[in-house]
Image (cartoon, rainbow, N blue to C red):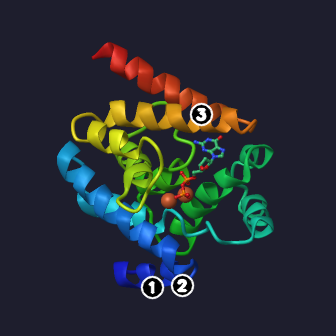
Amino acid sequence: MNKAQIIESVSVQMPERRWIHTQGVMSTAIELAKRYGENPERAELAAIIHDVAKYWPVAEQAAYIKQYSLDEQVLQYNKELWHAEVGASVAKEKYGVHDSEICDAIRYHTSGRANMTLIEKIVWLADYIEPNRDFPGVNEARALAETSLERAILFGLDQTIVFLIEKGKIVYPVTIEARNSIVQQLNMK
Ligand code: DGI
Ligand code: FE
Ligand code: FE
């Protein structure tokens, strides 16, 4: 599918406010790509598709993960993680995205992971700071994103982990690995 067809298909699978969020992630991903030396069109395509499965019923998300033999590990953790796994596969199977780095940027857009690629970092951060986001600390994350992808992502991962702990929720170990990996990268600079 071409970009216009993908946009049409994705946007009808979600409520208006989620499509507005997606447009914010698209523009922010383009901006970060230009700032940090990624191809803006690749970052934008990952952004367009990243939340495609967010509003699928969770039972359908789980069924899709099993049917397509995706990583069933996420089913043991919070449901908010599932749409990312599904979205990456939909990108490939339905939208014909064969750039595996774009699919991985979708796959890890919620959890993050250790040793994230540049496009994975950009999509993760764009999702966190896009202009429609409004939560305590978002302006600090935006300010950090002006000068350091890693500092901004560390801030975001720390906030997310603390939020989950305060709510008494499980933290996906891959998110902890993502956080530790970013700390190591910052320590090496
Ligand atoms: O889909 P979005 O709302 O745009 O954002 P997202 O895909 O980054 O989902 C974020 C939510 O996922 C956030 O409120 C925290 C929740 N979540 C639940 N368990 C985990 C988790 N996020 C991470 N990083 N790791 C988890 O284990
Ligand atoms: Fe998401
Ligand atoms: Fe999102």
* For residue 166, side relative to residue 31 (left or right): right
Looking at this view, name the residue that lies furthest to the front: 136
Q: Residue at x 31, y 45 (%)?
A: 142
Distance between the Cα atoms at labels 2 and 3?
A: 31 Å
Does the residue at mark 3 contact the one at mark 1 (Cβ under 8 Å)? no
Q: Nearer the viewer, residue 77 or 72?
A: 77
Residue marked by disc 3: 161
**Would residue 87 be seen by someone viewing this image from the given angle?**
yes
**Corner quadrant of residue 189:** top left
Q: Which residue is mark 1?
A: 8
Q: Is residue 129 above or below residue 165?
A: below
CA separation in Å, label 2 and label 1: 6 Å
Q: Specify which label sits upstream in the sequence, 3 or 1.
A: 1
Which amino acid type is marked by label 2?
Answer: Val
The residue located at (53%, 64%) in the rendering is 51
Q: Nearer the viewer, mark 3 or mark 1?
A: 3
Of the image marks 2 and 3, the number of the one nearer the N terminus? 2
Q: Residue at x 29, y 64 (%)?
A: 27
Residue 94 falls in which quadrant of the image?
A: bottom right
Q: Is residue 165 above or below residue 130?
A: above
Question: For the view shown, which residue lies furthest in the top direction?
Answer: 187
Q: Is residue 186 rendered to the left or right of residue 61?
A: left
Q: Secondary structure at mark 1?
A: helix
- Badge 3: how crowded within 10 Å, few (<14), some, or many (20+)? some
* Mark 1 crowd level (few <14, some 14–19, many ≥20, 10 Å Cα): few
